[in-house]
Image: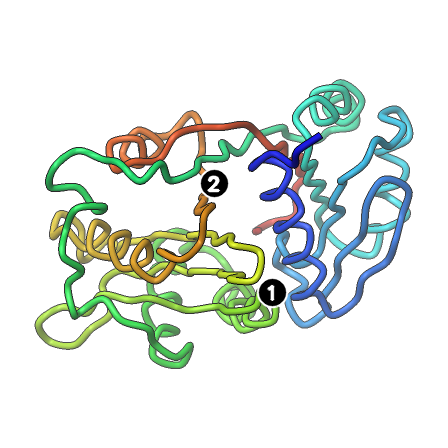
Amino acid sequence: MPVTDLQRIAAFRLSFARRQAAVVNEVPGGVVVLDAEYAASYEHNQLVIEGSPDPVGLPALAETALGHLEHRQITVLDDSTGTDCAPALIAAGYTHVTELVMTYTGSAAAGSAASAVPDPSARTVAFDELRPALVGQLRRWMPEAEDVVVGQLADRRTARLRGAEQVRFLAVHDEEGTVGSWADLYRDASEGIAQIEDVVTADTHVRRGYADTLLATALRHASDCGTVFLLADPDDWPHAWYIRRGFKPIGRFHVFTRAGSEG
């Protein structure tokens, strides 16, 4: 049977998790990815399920794999498997959320990101240029977090540079040269696939059209890829914003977490 876009996206996400990890341990149905340098990051210390594990045994598997951490996170890259695993994990104290997988259709309303001329102020930047904006926004989101946690959640972006064939940090600057909005672009031209991730506008720079500029620029950089996707919260407003800009939902992934303090 032909491989679907959703299957290609799941494979890309698994590959990204493996490539950016400091340690990869194989387990039944998936892999454990770890990075002690960013112990506060759920993304970099989690269990990623690609196959069909025993749903009842998954909480115990997570304890064995992640027991040295304060948090637990399990990402399931198959909708039916995630649904099957939910009861046992919720009973074990996990919170369950879904990620809406959205792909770019190549069409959008006039004036949207797809049809806009990319603003030259949206450009690729080095991590050091981006870091002050990341730290500032993380502080606004998590005012009580320890400095070490905020530092790890900002600096973990450097690990993402290993995750794909090409990783770009895109940023829009204001008239004074301050980074006001940013996003990641992960691109694998050989596979014809790209992911747009973490589109964020700083609270200090909202309502200036920066997100549209970013999205248009990212789409231009990914124009040679047949599949361009992003992940959105189905219960939050941005997914409707993406639909108006030419993206459509094609499926779901599942994420289960049990609390540490941050993530």
Residue placed most toward the observer, 94 or 118: 118
Residue placed most toward the observer, 228 or 175: 228
Residue placed most toward the observer, 224 or 123: 224
Question: Residue 228 placed where, x, y %?
Answer: 44, 47
Estimate how packed mark 1 is, as few (under 14), some (14 to 19) or many (20 or more) residues with alpha carbons within 10 Å: many
Residue kind at label 2, given as amino acid type:
Leu
Estimate how packed mark 2 is, as few (under 14), some (14 to 19) or many (20 or more) residues with alpha carbons within 10 Å: many
Residue kind at label 1, given as amino acid type:
Gly
Q: Quadrant of residue 202?
A: bottom left
Q: What colour scheme was applied to this rendering of the protein?
A: rainbow
Badge 1 element: loop
Q: Is residue 114 left or right of residue 247?
A: left
Residue at left 36%, top 32%? 239
Q: Quadrant of residue 91?
A: top right
Q: Is residue 152 left or right of residue 173?
A: right
Question: Residue 127 placed where, x, y %?
Answer: 42, 77
Q: Residue lying farthest left?
A: 175
Residue placed most toward the observer, 206 or 71: 206
Residue at left 74%, top 26%? 81
Q: Which residue is mark 1?
A: 163
Question: Residue 238 placed where, x, y %?
Answer: 32, 35
Q: Which residue is mark 2?
A: 231
Badge 2 element: strand
Question: Residue 256 placed where, x, y %?
Answer: 67, 35
**Above or below: residue 202 compared with residue 132:** above
- Quadrant of the snapshot with the N terminus: top right
**Above or below: residue 28 compared with residue 206:** above
Q: Earlier in the sequence, mark 2 or mark 1?
A: 1
**Above or below: residue 243 compared with residue 220:** above
Residue at left 51%, top 52%? 193
Q: Is residue 19 left or right of residue 208?
A: right
